[in-house]
Amino acid sequence: MDNNSDKKLGIGLVGLGTYSSGELAPALKETSHCYLAGVVSGAREKREQWKQEHNLKDDNVYSYENFDSIRDNPEIDIVYVVLPNSMHKEFVIRAANAGKHVICEKPMATTISDCQQMMETCQNAGVMLSVGYRLHFDPFNQEMMRLGQNDKLGKINKVIAKNGMDVGNKDQWRLNKEKAGGGPLMDLGVYCIQGAIYTTGSLPIAVNAKFSKKTDPEKFKDVEEGIEWEMDFVEGVVAQCECSYSKELNVLRAETQHGWFELQPAYEYRGLVGNTSEGPMEFPHYRQQARQMDEFAQCVMQRKESRVPGEMGMRDVEILMAIYQSATSGQRVELHLERYEHMIES
């Protein structure tokens, strides 16, 4: 692919739910290096609606059944998989086999072996794979990285990372274990894991977890309602984490030798607020997804690895599985993540 800076790459969105309609489609109107070129959906009405609203060509609108013919469409360079977690593997693999670069929403998959197959298929097909970790492109979270990894307020002693919401309707796919792979840990806990790692600039060496008591056993019969866990890092640093589908939580905080710094809210699409013991964080607010997709388009054009590659997604799924193992067994679970050491973003 050429390195023409004027070229825009076409993105095809697979799955036209709330995130695609409310965040990704608007973001693709603000991007400089990519644009909405096509869509894929199992619902004919949605396909027709998106085609009309976004002035898409008939040939760039696909169903799940005819998706593989996307290989013959030169206008779609990147496929963004925005489906329930259990469908990530199938469509990442199908996209790669069609010769398309891929962004996969988080969590990357519901098992480590699925992640491995996704990565291997992309590598064998010669396409790039990135995970939808939008917060790596947000200036407030980038400031958490800078302050923590450079000991700007002294060494970190403790990280607090909590993310929760009222999940709402009991009939949604997020409460179906087969589709989601789990409950709030899979959906919201990924942000806590990510935040603790990029704030400390290191990988956890062990986890200790417990499920929260279910206040609505019928609603949460298939998945956990909440989960609390600690991640141990080297030099005695601890991350205290929690995620929930029944209460509002949204903080990433580091307590250090000489002070503290935090985001609250930390993980939202917009309206993040940062403070430190030395004063507030002042940054412009950007649409995270526009920056995320623009950078991946540039990575594709320049053949440069994404800062949030598939390998990072697999690392986090490995940690998620260890947290579930600990909560289920009641035992501390050791982590052996040395092969991911090169993945700490600074």
Image: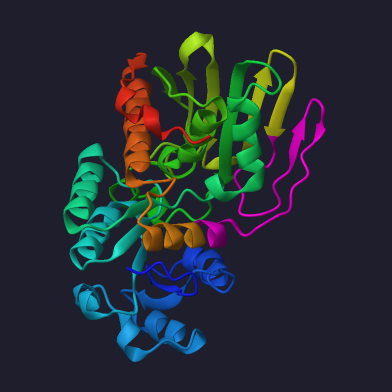
Left or right of 122, for residue 196: right
Q: Quadrant of residue 195?
A: top right
Q: Is residue 222 visible?
A: no
Q: Is residue 36 placed above or below 252 in the rendered structure?
A: below
Left or right of 258, for residue 57: left
Q: Name the main secondary structure of what is drawn in magenta.
A: loop
Q: Quadrant of residue 275?
A: top right
Q: Is residue 269 visible?
A: yes
State which region is magenta. 263-292
User: In front here: 110 or 210?
Assistant: 110
Residue at far top of view = 236
User: In front here: 186 or 305?
Assistant: 305
| Residue 10 screen position, x and y as percent | 40, 74
Q: Is residue 33 placed above or below 220 in the rendered structure?
A: below
| Residue 90 screen position, x and y as percent | 22, 58
| Residue 16 screen position, x and y as percent | 42, 70
The N terminus lies in quadrant = bottom left
